[in-house]
Image: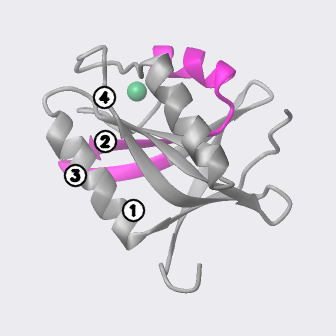
Amino acid sequence: MAIPRIAQIQLTSSHRRQLYGIRRRALPHEGCALLLGRYIEKGLIARVVRIAEAENIARSISSFEIDPEHQYCILMAAAKEGLEQVGIYHSHPAPPTPSASDLEFMEFNPCVWVIDGIQKERFRMKAYQLWQGFLKSVGIQSISSKGR
Ligand code: ZN
C-alpha cells in the first residue's frame, strides 16, 4: 500500500481535547494513540474521525510502544467502520520533533505522525510524515465536527 505525500491532517477541537487528556493521563510518560479516519482529496488530506487511546507499554519518558495485539484489535474494529489508521499520536516532554527512534519507526509506519511537545514553555503540536526517506512537515487543520 503506497501512501501518498500527505499535506494536511484534519482534527476537530474535540479531538484536540481528547489528545490533551491522553497526554495528561500518561504523565510522566509519553502518551500515545492511533488516529483513525480516511484519506480524502486523492490522499492529500488525512481526516481523523476517531481517536483510539493506547497504553504506552514502554512506560518511558523518552519513547513509546503500543502493544501490537491491542493495535491489531483497534485496526480491526476501525476497518468495520470503514476507517483506517491515518496517523499516530504521541507526546514528548520535550520539543515536538521526531527523536532518532521515532524516525526509525516512521519508516515502517508511513502515516502522519502527530507529536505533542513543549517548546518555549508552551504546548505545541506538530505533524510529520517520513516520505520517500525525507522528513516532511504536515499541516494540522482544525475543522468543525459538524457535517461529517
Ligand atoms: Zn517521540
Q: Residue at x 56, y 50 (%)?
A: 36
State the residue in front, 40 or 8: 40
Tell me: 54 left or right of 144. left
Q: Identify residue type, mark 4.
A: Glu
Near mark 3 (Cα within 10 A), the count class, few <14, some 14-19 or many ≥20, is few
Verify CB contact (< 8 Å) between mark 4 and mark 2: no
Q: What element carries label 4?
A: loop
Q: Identify residue type, mark 3.
A: Gly
Q: Is residue 54 above or below residue 144?
A: above
Q: In the image, which disc is placed on residue 21?
A: 3
Q: Residue at x 30, y 57 (%)?
A: 18
Near mark 4 (Cα within 10 A), the count class, few <14, some 14-19 or many ≥20, is some
What separation in Å lies between label 1 and label 4 (alpha carbons)? 18 Å
Image quarter of residue 62: top left
What separation in Å lies between label 4 and label 2 (alpha carbons)? 18 Å
What separation in Å lies between label 3 and label 1 (alpha carbons)? 10 Å
Q: Is mark 2 on a helix, strand or loop?
A: strand
Magenta residue span:
99-126
Q: What element carries label 1?
A: helix
For marks 3 and 2, give the one nearer the viewer: 3
